Image (cartoon, rainbow, N blue to C red):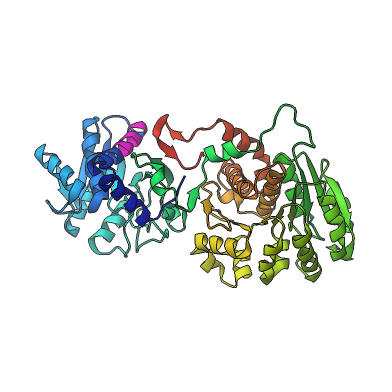
Amino acid sequence: MKVLDCAVMQKADRQMVEKYSFPGAVLMESAGMRAVEFIAAQLPQGAKVLILSGPGNNGGDGLVIARQLSRAGYSASLWSTEKAGAYRGDASVNEKHLQKISYPLNRLADPSDLDLFRDEIDSADILVDALFGIGIDRDISGLYEKVIETINAGKKPVLAIDIPSGINADTGAVMGCAVRANWTITYAFPKKGLFLYPGSEHTGKVLVGDINIPDFLVEDEKVELLTHEYIRNNLPPRPAYSHKFSLGSTLIVAGSVGMTGAAVLAAQSALQSGSGIVYLAAPRSVCNAMETKLVEVISVPLPEKEDGIIDPEAVDIIIEKAKNCDAMAVGPGLDTGQPTSDLLYKLVQLSPIPLVLDAGALGALGSKMNMLRSARHQPVVTPHPGEMARLIGKTAQQVQSNRLETAMVNASLWNCIVVLKGPNTVIATPEGRAMINPTGSPALATAGSGDILTGMIASFISQGMTSEKAAAAAAYLHGLAGDLIPAGRGHMARDILDRFKDAFLYLEKCECGYQGNPYLKWVRPV
């Protein structure tokens, strides 16, 4: 599913009207219908809905919602920040229609009107935010700021139309202040700002409402949102005649003194993600400790340069083992010193199979990430924001404020798949494309979570997926496993592994359509 910025969405709207002669009023009517369908599934007839309409087409959507709700048997209280006659285009058509049928329209023209507006919020069952749409590009102030503060202080359930008012649709920035919504219905295609922080904190649960804008109008866009249909359709098959040698062999190079847990988690993850065989190549001195924890994994003891650190000359053993494997993950729990750097330089150039590099591997490569261009297969790298900041000489805050571009630029620069972890994880390709993962929860914010993701990516590659699709599927399912963990404290990385079976099952069985409505879909399954 394509993810758009404001300019592209507005262009698609114009094309529908100007090039394909699709009336804008019909688009607006469809947008209103999606909101009404959602509310009707949430609340019984007679419930009180407060609709706040601002300027422009987003405000016009609010006018339509009020009319449709009223006809559907709801008590729809409509408020507008615009003076009578101020609406233009399709919004004006709807305003005039409301005037003709004598529909009561309350005006929020002055701070003195806020007291009555606040009283209306207090008595409402739900509030519809149609104040500002995706086009806002400057900070909110004055009366609008007070209106948003009043909405947030009211603590009533809020449904945002297209995007919570005050969120920049391109960057996710809060433009001075912003509505905090419980749900957001975004129309036709998701907008980037819905998945970039801090905007993502304001959206609540996000649905996409179909308003008859076809996909071909935006087919050249480079950013997509991962969907459960895409992941489900691309998971490697497991035929009835499968055996361990047909389901892929994964090689994990990991571990050091004090860091055996990371290696164990990566290996377990590869197994539980479906690899038929998993080998764990680790410093000889820590293999015994890991073998007591890993019954089903085959250990490959490696010679050591010093206690617990793999000798760079072990590259020959690793390459020989790799010839009988399908993918290799390198990094969980590895020491980041010079011996590991020397080992990595050789592995990158000599590995006959795709590489997934994380943790210690990224630390060992450091500023020499450009050498990934010499790999025989495009590697996958999985930095968290702090690691990415160190790799490119920036701060974590700079990385977080520009996640999409950071991932995309460096994927091209390094000629690899970049999985920039964190909410919401970005998967970028050297060809200039990116995918945003909508799944995941704070349960993933724990030591070992990244090692589990690394093992899963390598496992999917070993089962036959391309590196790009494996990274996308792993990010999605890893996040889904986190979503299935009960909210609250007390969880650790093993709890993520424990939810793998549930995540695979959930993916197979769930549908993201809302209450069976084919025109409304959740962007995440949980």
The answer to whether residue 18 is left or right of residue 337 is left
Q: Is residue 146 visible?
A: yes
Residue at the (31%, 30%) spot, across then down: 44
The answer to whether residue 480 is left or right of residue 254 is left
The answer to whether residue 253 is left or right of residue 116 is right
Which residue appears farthest toward the top when viewing the image?
240
* Number of disc labels: 0
Residue 35 highlighted magenta (yes or no): yes
Could you tell me what secondary structure mostly forms the magenta stretch? helix
Where is 69 relative to 457, above or below? above
The answer to whether residue 309 is left or right of residue 121 is right
Q: Which segment did they paint magenta?
A: 33-41
Q: Quadrant of residue 337?
A: bottom right
Please provide percent x and percent y for residue 217: 38, 47
Residue at the (29%, 36%) spot, across then down: 33
Q: Nearer the viewer, residue 31 or 462?
A: 462
Residue 416 highlighted magenta (yes or no): no
Please provide percent x and percent y for residue 476: 58, 45
Please provide percent x and percent y for residue 442: 56, 51
Residue at the (37%, 57%) spot, across then down: 167
Where is 201 relative to 235, above or below? below
Please provide percent x and percent y for residue 383: 63, 60
Q: Is residue 385 visible?
A: no
Which residue appears farthest toward the front when viewing the image?
19
